[in-house]
Amino acid sequence: GSWFAKQYAQEPVPTLNELLNLLKKLKININLEIKPTLGKEAETAEKSIEILKKFWPIAESPPMISTQSEICLRVVHKIAPELC
């Protein structure tokens, strides 16, 4: 964040779990965009959905899942069809 202002230098990037907890607290829904590294599409989608299912109230606030990776979309559809 130092490119924006010096006060944000060394500011850590929140984990997905931390972000989900903050969004729940603020009552804001999420569009989880999965941006995998080439060759890690399935692994990234699986882990992202695992965290989402564990920490997000899906039944009361269904998230939106987006990605430009067809592999990620196929994995999400297979392991969490309720999110598609």
Image: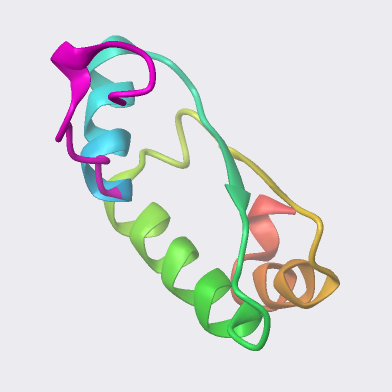
Vertical relation: 78 (above or below) 56: below
Image mark count: 0
Query: Whole-percent x and y of residue 14?
Result: 25, 40
Task: Describe residue 44's horizontal placement relative to residue 76 as left or right.
Answer: left
Query: Which residue: 33% across, 48% down?
Result: 16
Query: Which residue: 48% across, 63% down?
Result: 49
Query: Which residue: 60% across, 76% down?
Result: 79
Task: Describe residue 6's horizontal placement relative to residue 63 as left or right.
Answer: left
Query: Whole-percent x and y of residue 50?
Result: 40, 68
Q: Is residue 10 magenta?
A: yes
Q: Quadrant of residue 68?
A: bottom right
Judging depth in this view, the residue of 11 and 71 nearest the camera is 11
Task: Describe residue 32's horizontal placement relative to residue 38 as left or right.
Answer: left
Judging depth in this view, the residue of 84 and 59 nearest the camera is 84
Query: Which residue: 73% across, 69% down?
Result: 77
Q: Is residue 61 magenta?
A: no
**Where are the magenta residues, as a range?**
1-15
Q: How is the image coloured?
A: rainbow
Q: Quadrant of residue 81?
A: bottom right
Query: Whole-percent x and y of residue 45?
Result: 57, 70
Q: Quadrant of residue 6?
A: top left
Vertical relation: 2 (above or below) 72: above
Vertical relation: 56 (above or below) 43: above
Judging depth in this view, the residue of 57 and 39 nearest the camera is 39
Q: Which image quarter is the C terminus in?
A: bottom right
- Is the stretch drawn in magenta largely helix, strand or loop? loop
Vertical relation: 48 (above or below) 17: below
Q: Which image quarter is the N terminus in?
A: top left
